[in-house]
Amino acid sequence: MALIRIALFPLALIYQCVTDLRNVLYEFGLKKSTKAAKPAICVGNLTVGGTGKTPHVEYLIQLLKPHYKLATLSRGYGRKTKGFLLASPALNAADLGDEPMQFYQKFGQEVYVAVGEKRVPALVQLTDEHPDVELILLDDAFQHRALKPHFNLLLTDYRRLFYQDFVLPAGRLRESRRHAKRANAVVVTKCPPHLSPSERCDIQKQVRAYTPPETPVFFTYIRYGLPLPLWTETPAIEQYLSHVKDSQQLRITLVTGIAHTQPLTQFLRQHYTIKQHFSFKDHHHYSPQDLKNIQQGFQKQLASSFDIILTTEKDAVKWQSPELAAILQELPVYYLPIEIDFLADKEEFDALIVKQVKKYAKQIENF
């Protein structure tokens, strides 16, 4: 691996020079950066691949929606459409992208969910058409320098901390580590639930070598819930578990289309039995043939009434289109809900976010 990285270093150097130049042009005003007209929080990262942005955006929604009319704005990665779209019952994951569709299914009656690859005109259209919007959550917009948020929340995966990584293609960084200086707060995600205070302190020091020294650093972990039925007629998982002496008797055909499956499979093996795993690339577009293969694989391995198909929330939203749902409708299909929690300082994080939103809202009001 080290030899491959060394071989790719010249390309990484070129890539870094290009991204550094781009950032310099924005920082010196040679490329236009538009300040959001409403308070805007960016949730982003320095790396390609999953750092857990979706559950962190959902956490912010839960925190702020009792007090503000919220909107989320995403690029809509992997969608089959272009331009600005506002989520509605007529659209599906192929139109919006899997993560915005997940936001809409959870919060659609309370939160505007919008997508647009060009964030500035998308934000203008969103606020023009819905002037009641008071706060925007920008999903994965840390590198979208054309739109300047009021607060940058930078996420970094515990298993691949940005200060240990390298610029593409030698590593997975979209830009140099030093551009973490734009972060107003950093969250180390997907931590082990029992990460020691001393290790947290060491990570904080390493992070702050690239950020302003006062930048707060928080630590979160993923908390998994009980599997939930995808179809309304499917029994609750508690009915299965009430008939077994050991949850390991529940046998799972696992289907994933996410960036990193290891934490998920590790958790599931602690509680259930994974009999087979259909693993697809992140943001995979499921075809009818994919689901037929899953159906056939499940039925081939079917050994008892305690066999189920389990997928992620992000994948589940894609299976609900009529074309795909019809294939698995008669099978016991479940998805695994997740949420994030803090190892420490949850109240401090909440207070920081609420304080910053109030400050920026007042600044805009007085402008």
Image (spheres, rainbow, N blue to C red):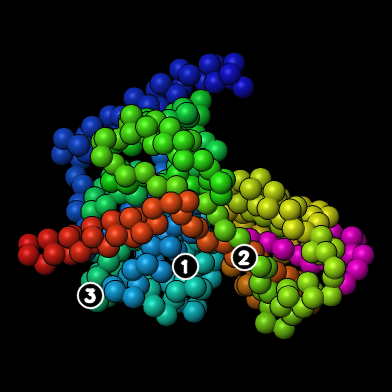
Q: Are marks 1 and 3 in contact (CB under 8 Å)?
A: no
CA gap, disc 1 and disc 3? 20 Å
CA gap, disc 1 and disc 2? 18 Å
Q: Is residue 299 left or right of residue 366?
A: right
* Residue type at the position of mark 1: Phe
The span shown in magenta is: 294-316
CA gap, disc 3 and disc 2? 36 Å
Magenta region includes residue 298 = yes
* Residue type at the position of mark 2: Gly
Q: Is residue 31 left or right of residue 87?
A: left
Q: Earlier in the sequence, mark 3 or mark 2?
A: 3
Is 51 drawn above or below residue 350 in the view shown? above
Q: Which mark is residue 126?
A: none
Q: Position of residue 347 (x, y in %)?
A: 36, 59
Crowd class of label 3 (few under 14; some 14 to 19; many from 20; radius 10 Å): few
Q: Nearer the viewer, mark 1 or mark 3?
A: 1
Q: Which residue is mark 2?
A: 225
Q: Nearer the viewer, residue 271 or 179?
A: 271
Q: Secondary structure at mark 3?
A: loop
Q: Nearer the viewer, residue 213 or 23?
A: 213
Which quadrant of the figure contains the N terminus? Answer: top right
Crowd class of label 2 (few under 14; some 14 to 19; many from 20; radius 10 Å): few
Q: Residue furthest bottom?
A: 233
Q: Position of residue 114 (x, y in %)?
A: 38, 66
Q: Residue at x 52, y 36 (%)?
A: 160
Magenta region includes residue 306 = yes
Is 313 drawn above or below residue 147 in the view shown? below
Q: Which mark is residue 131?
A: 3
